[in-house]
Image: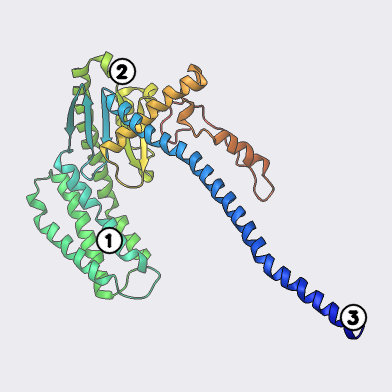
Amino acid sequence: MKGKAFSRLISMVVAVCTFLAGTAPALCESKGVVGQERLTASKAAAMRLYDLDDKMQANYAVTQRLVGESQSPVLLALFNGVGGKYVLRRQGSVVEIEPVPPLYQQVKSVSHTIVGVFVIVSPYFNSPGDNWKPKLAEFNKMLVKALEILDQAGMPEKVEKNCRTILKGGISFTGRALRTGKVTASDYSAYTKKVWPSIKENIELAAKLQVDHFEDVLTRWRKEMGEAEWSKLYAVVNSAWAMRRENVHFQILAEMMGSDAINDRLIMAESILDVTEDDLIMLLGRIINDRDLAVNVFGQELEYRMDVELMGEAARDEIIKKASPHHPVIDKNWMKYKENKMPNEE
């Protein structure tokens, strides 16, 4: 192809390229606008749907507070460092009871010194360095001062003897570690074994003081209420995960309220952070409200259905479908929706 024919072909190619170059951005821009409009519309639609749940949650919180605060009588058992606090909300009044007798906190503080030593030295059992020394020296001085004034605390003779043994053991271990510049797990273990018999007796005493104190309180409140009102009592116990099993307050209340109250009117509230009285009231409101909801949705025979994760069974079925030799199904018998067992009871 030569001459004019070749020139005409080149001109046609240039023209086509020029046309495409001019129109392509416009086409792309048009498609982009349409795509963006669709994306925006989809997002707006999703937000409308999310708004429904947001509004439900907001209204739910209001209702659960109304339900929680309207209950009477309600007992809130809160964990604290002095043996616990019981708050009775009854007929518009609020009564708070704490603490356990001071001897409880005294023997607890002395017995906890083995923990006080452990948290300082344990990170260095298998590591070089002496970053632990300043903290351990400070704790050693505190142990010495505590021993010096121990006879002024007014403890019973046997209790004072146990506390003296514990403090002397701590002073001996920390003093030796500071002198030698070494801390080992075996040395720590040997120290705790020597003082453990005294700590064990302190634990038994502390448990007696705590149980006697709060059972006396509950006996008095029960007498004031009478059996008819007592049988309607709701109690909420807050606990960290590690103290859920054999929880002291839950045991006391279960004994006083009866096994039928467990997980019905006697409720365990597990948490990571310290909860407030308001948190427990909100939880109670939610539980009671959910049970009312369950009756209306599922029927009276499934009043406790909302006490259990609603999607739990469906999730379980899906997990079973996906099971494989490398990911077998855990053989687990699920408890009934309503069960009156203590935490972790078989």
> Which dot, 2 or 1, sits closer to the camera?
2
Q: Residue at x 13, y 43 (%)?
A: 156
Q: Residue 275 in the image: x percent, y percent?
A: 29, 42
Query: The residue under label 3 is which amino acid type?
Result: Ala
Q: Position of residue 108 (x, y in %)?
A: 22, 47
Looking at the rendered structure, the secondary structure element under dot 3 is: helix
Image point 57% across, 36% down: which residue? 332
Q: Are marks 2 and 3 in contact (CB under 8 Å)?
A: no
For the residue pair 296 and 215, the one nearer the viewer reads as 296
Q: Position of residue 317 (x, y in %)?
A: 63, 36
Please give the residue where the numbered disc 3 appears in the rendered image.
Answer: 5
Q: Which residue is mark 1?
A: 117
User: Which of labels 2 and 3 is toward the front?
Assistant: 3
Specify the quadrant of the image occupied by residue 93: top left
Residue type indicated by callout 1? Val
Give the mark, 2 or 1, whose residue is nearer the N terminus. Answer: 1
Q: Residues within 10 Å of mark 3 (few under 14, many from 20)?
A: few
> How far across and how far down the image is residue 102, in percent?
14, 42
Question: Taking 225 as reference, is 343 above or below it?
Answer: below
Total labels: the figure holds 3
Give the distance between the C-alpha atoms of the residues marked 2 and 3, in whole angstroms: 107 Å
> How many angstroms separate mark 2 from mark 1 (CA)?
46 Å
Residue on which disc 2 sits: 231
Identify which amino acid the numbered label 2 is placed on. Answer: Ser
